[in-house]
């Protein structure tokens, strides 16, 4: 490459570098540094080496919060991805043909609606619907004679996490549907016609063509939703605040508590640092798998 | 369930189609199943809308599913006045619009250097922006809180605008760099022949040509910033500075909130989001896909 041709561009990166240093690099380095100290947020941090981390690994709440995250990955990444795949295929391959594109578009937009609501609003809507005394769900159950099924959905440690998981499935479903339907546009319709000619059934076409050809979207959806699950904060804050008795505690809320409620900034920093390491490692593992798969799949 | 009903499609579907009756029944089953699912998805919002315009007495007497006896707007009006909702809307709009414009501007500058300029160490910068993209905000939260306090930017919309401009531009830089890497070099050469400098080329050639992508980014940054919760919750503590999500989020558990007031508050939070959704629907569905193209 001709180097003189590429001269004079570096200057354009200066604002971005300065801004990133101030807002991302410096705070990130500070958090990692603080994680090796004991600090209340006031005065001088006291260096304690890896004490926060050894304490973290013995903290039942820390392990519980990661256990909850695994279940939330099921609710936010695994189930929506699989359900979204089937829905997108049905909409693209059946509804669009049998009823027209407008219907397919209508359903797609409808499923996407929860995604555009602010997280806080989602929380308000659901914590009201699931409220034990004046909530809509229990009142509906009562009015159809199933009052005995009524529960304190978010207030009972046994049901709180499953309730949050259900809300998250509702929230996430539209994203994979939109992504997969966009990916399906790429597929040459002749492929489907050829499969029809060969006598392939719907299920075979779905598995051999649809799923195979939209693998790029599949990876993107799986990575982004998994990372979103690892970072989840807003919904937990407005639905349960990690309770009851830590039944829905997640790492980001656990860190928030330590930062701003318990003034244990060092410990909170250790939690955030651990979470960050996990997310970054996961992102790179996914990228590698994706690259390898693309090279093989051509 | 679909497998059993559909998979027996015989060979040569066009000739040996299943009997007309079977086919129309299948159509009906699929349509009804999808409509039921759609109803489940939007039901919470419908229930909210229904109860936001009910009087508390009506709600107590007839429950959440009945139609309102009379349209009772005062729940919404009272809530609006009590939390000064117009103010929160303005705060949200101002920060989101500023972040959308500044974030895209910063992304363009970065991507110009990385995607078109292909400056040295380009790969490392891209890796950095990729990591910045996936970082959880709580790993930045405390130092940002601490630094903004010492700079007297705490509890101010300025801090939120600065932080989200940078956070959003990490995504924008990553996406735009790959778009600009494919930028037609003939256009750049033509600009160079005309004697245009780097700035002129950027402003007169690169930005106009990539306008559709930039429009998608502006839309995204606006809505993402509008919906942000975690950092605004930490930074915007006084009522005058709260954004819509923060104002609604901290009301949870407030003793003033009964069922109808809660619905009213949820409705005023839903409406702007639905408005953006309708306005930007086309850009959005195109844009969600834009992220997938690497």
Image: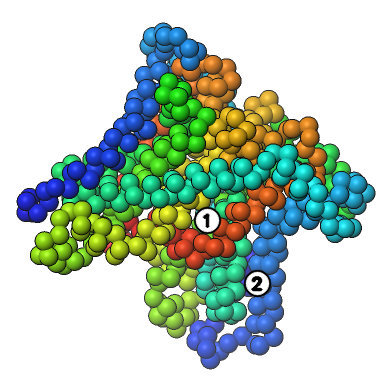
Q: Chain of mark 2?
A: B
For label 1, the residue is A175
Q: Quadrant of the N terminus of chain B?
A: bottom right
Secondary structure at badge 1 equals: helix
Residue at figure coordinates x 39%, y 70% from the top left: A186
Whether callout 2 and callout 1 share a subunit is answered no
Secondary structure at badge 2 equals: helix
Residue at figure coordinates x 59%, y 53% from the top left: B273
Task: In this rendered view, identify the residue nearer to me: B132 or A53.
Answer: B132
The mark lying in front, picked from 2 and 1, is: 1
**Placement of B237 over or under B114, stated as above or below:** above
Q: Is residue B50 left or right of residue B291?
A: right
Q: Chain of mark 1?
A: A
For label 2, the residue is B30
Residue at figure coordinates x 54%, y 76% from the top left: A101
Colour scheme: rainbow
Residue at figure coordinates x 48%, y 18% from the top left: A265
**Placement of A132 over or under A118, stated as above or below:** above
Q: Is residue B33 left or right of residue B242?
A: right
Q: Where residue A201 appears, x then y in whole percent?
A: 52, 75
């Amino acid at each position: 490459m001709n180097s003189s041709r590429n001269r004079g561009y570096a200057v354009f990166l200066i604002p971005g570098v300065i801004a990133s240093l101030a807002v991302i690099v410096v705070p990130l380095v500070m958090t990692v540094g603080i994680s090796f100290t004991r600090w209340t947020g006031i005065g001088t941090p006291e260096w304690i080496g890896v004490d926060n981390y050894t304490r973290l690994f013995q903290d039942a709440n820390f392990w519980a919060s990661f256990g909850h995250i695994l279940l939330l990955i099921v609710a936010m990444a695994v189930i929506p991805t699989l359900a979204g795949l089937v829905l997108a295929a049905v909409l693209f391959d059946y509804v669009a043909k049998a009823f027209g594109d407008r219907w397919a578009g209508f359903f797609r937009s409808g499923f996407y609606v929860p995604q555009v609501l602010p997280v806080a609003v989602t929380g308000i809507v659901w914590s009201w619907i699931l409220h034990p005394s004046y909530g809509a769900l229990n009142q509906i159950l009562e009015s159809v004679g199933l009052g005995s099924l009524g529960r304190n959905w978010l207030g009972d440690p046994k049901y709180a996490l499953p309730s949050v998981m259900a809300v998250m499935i509702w929230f996430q479903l539209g994203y994979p549907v939109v992504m997969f339907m966009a990916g399906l546009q790429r597929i040459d319709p002749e492929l489907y016609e050829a499969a029809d000619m060969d006598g392939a059934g719907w299920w075979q076409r779905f598995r051999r063509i649809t799923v195979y050809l939209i693998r790029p979207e599949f990876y993107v959806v799986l990575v982004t939703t998994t990372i979103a699950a690892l970072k989840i904060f807003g919904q937990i804050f407005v639905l349960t605040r990690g309770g009851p008795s830590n039944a829905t505690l997640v790492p980001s809320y656990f860190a928030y508590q330590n930062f701003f409620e318990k003034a244990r900034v060092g410990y909170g920093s250790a939690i955030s640092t651990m979470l960050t390491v996990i997310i970054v490692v996961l992102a790179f593992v996914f990228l590698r798998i994706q690259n390898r798969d693309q090279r093989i799949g051509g | 369930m679909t497998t059993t009903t559909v998979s027996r499609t015989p060979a040569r579907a066009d000739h040996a189609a299943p009997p007309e009756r079977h086919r129309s029944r299948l159509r009906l089953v699929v349509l009804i199943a999808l409509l039921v699912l759609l109803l489940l998805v939007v039901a919470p919002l419908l229930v909210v809308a229904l109860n936001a315009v009910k009087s508390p007495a009506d709600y107590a007497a007839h429950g959440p599913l009945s139609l309102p006896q009379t349209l009772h707007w005062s729940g919404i009006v009272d809530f609006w006045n009590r939390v000064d909702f117009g103010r929160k809307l303005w705060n949200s709009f101002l920060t989101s619009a500023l972040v959308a414009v500044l974030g895209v501007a910063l992304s363009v500058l970065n991507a110009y250097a990385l995607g078109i300029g292909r400056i040295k160490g380009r790969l490392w910068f891209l890796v950095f922006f990729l990591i910045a993209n996936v970082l959880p905000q709580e790993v930045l939260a405390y130092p940002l809180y601490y630094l903004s306090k010492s700079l007297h930017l705490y509890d101010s919309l300025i801090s939120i605008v600065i932080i989200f401009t940078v956070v959003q531009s990490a995504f924008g830089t990553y996406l735009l760099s790959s778009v600009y890497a494919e930028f037609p070099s003939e256009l750049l050469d033509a600009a160079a022949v005309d004697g245009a400098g780097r700035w002129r080329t950027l402003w007169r050639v690169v930005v106009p040509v990539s306008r559709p992508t930039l429009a998608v980014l502006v839309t995204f940054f606006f809505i993402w910033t509008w919906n942000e919760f975690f950092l605004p919750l930490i930074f915007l503590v006084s009522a005058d500075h709260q954004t819509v999500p923060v104002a609604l989020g901290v009301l949870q558990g407030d003793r003033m909130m009964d069922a109808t007031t809660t619905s009213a508050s949820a409705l005023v939070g839903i409406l702007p989001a639905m408005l953006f959704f309708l306005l930007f629907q086309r850009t959005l569905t195109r844009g969600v896909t834009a992220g997938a193209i690497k």
